[in-house]
Image (cartoon, rainbow, N blue to C red):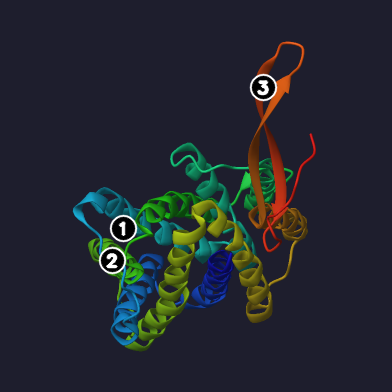
Amino acid sequence: MIKQFIAMLFALLAAVLYAINIPVSKILLNSIHPVLMASFLYFGAGIGMFGYSKISKKDKKEKLSKKELPYTIAMIVLDIIAPIFMMLGLSTANSSNASLLNNFEIVATSVIAMVIFKEVISKKMWMAIILVTISSTILSLENIEALKFSWGSIYIVLACISWGIENNCTRVLSSKSTFQIVIIKGIFSGLGSLIIALILRINIPSISLIVLTLALGFVSYGLSIYFYVKSQSIIGAAKTSSFYSVSPFIGSFLSFIILKEVLSANYLIALLIMIIGAVLIVFDTLAITHSHDHIHIDKEIKKEIIHSHLHFHWQGKQDTHEHKH
């Protein structure tokens, strides 16, 4: 129970740290190309976590092996694609909308976790997924009457799908060294984006902007990913993503405060729907369901009948109880 509580705190901390990324990146994108921005953010994560690992020396988990190589490669490739989509979207989309749209990552993560990795998704989680999808669709519409979609929002949704797949790849690796995972993510994903930027002949920004972006990457990507992976190793990909769902609301609030953005009617409607979805996600994650098998003797046919009863409990309460039959 204590480990699960700590895992939830890790997921929430990861959410808060990542939330800082949206409004600050929006400002930096005025001077840095989206592809280079994605590169420096991940480089900051990798370099920063390498330094932190040397100071901390707490991670005694097993290192990644050749067995995990396919998932490691997939993780790196997706971490090259996703932030580029995110920065391209953020460069044109409203920052508050972009923050809320990040919750679509939960939908992608949960559905992939169910289909490929056989994680169980409850009715509450399905309802939350539907609500988050509806909210994301509203945020993606530039003009509801004409049903015109915003390309910025579509890029962000594509980033969320990419990260949803990547989250499940990382889930497979999460029992291994957390520091190693984050360092590999940061260095190789940053390098991949940098190569793309050089091929496209994108202008390199000033040293001061690079240093600032690297620092943002360490905080919002490096430390955030570190706590996210730690949480995943205890409560799984779908549940970690559910607690991570507070990040868009924090990011949206910061965007409103820092960037003084005007909140549209679309945003307010989507916000209400998203809050209901997020509440359902949290309730689903805090709940435990399990079943008991019981044996009864049917007096008429004189045979044993075995059946199960599903019970619902809240985490934190004692699990001792009795049932009458």
Dividing the picture into quarters, in which one does residue 20 lie?
Answer: bottom right
| Residue at mark 2 | 184
Element carrying mark 1? helix
Q: Bin the neighbour count of mark 2 within 10 Å (Cα to Cα): few under 14, some 14-19, many 20 and up.
A: many
| Residue at mark 3 | 305
Instruction: Say what amino acid the circle numbered 2 marks.
Output: Ile
Using the image as rendered, state which of residue 56 and residue 251 is in the foreground.
56
| Mark nearer the N terminus (1 vs 3) | 1
Residue at 70 percent across and 26 percent down: it is 296
Residue at 54 percent across and 47 percent down: it is 110
Q: Which part of the image, by quadrant, shows the N terminus?
A: bottom right
| Mark nearer the N terminus (2 vs 3) | 2
Q: Is residue 64 above or below residue 24?
A: above
- Residue 90: image x %, image y %? 52, 64
Q: CA distance from mark 2 to mark 3?
A: 54 Å
| Residue at mark 1 | 76
Instruction: Say what amino acid the circle numbered 1 marks.
Output: Ile
Instruction: Say what amino acid the circle numbered 3 marks.
Output: Ile
- Residue 118: image x %, image y %? 48, 39
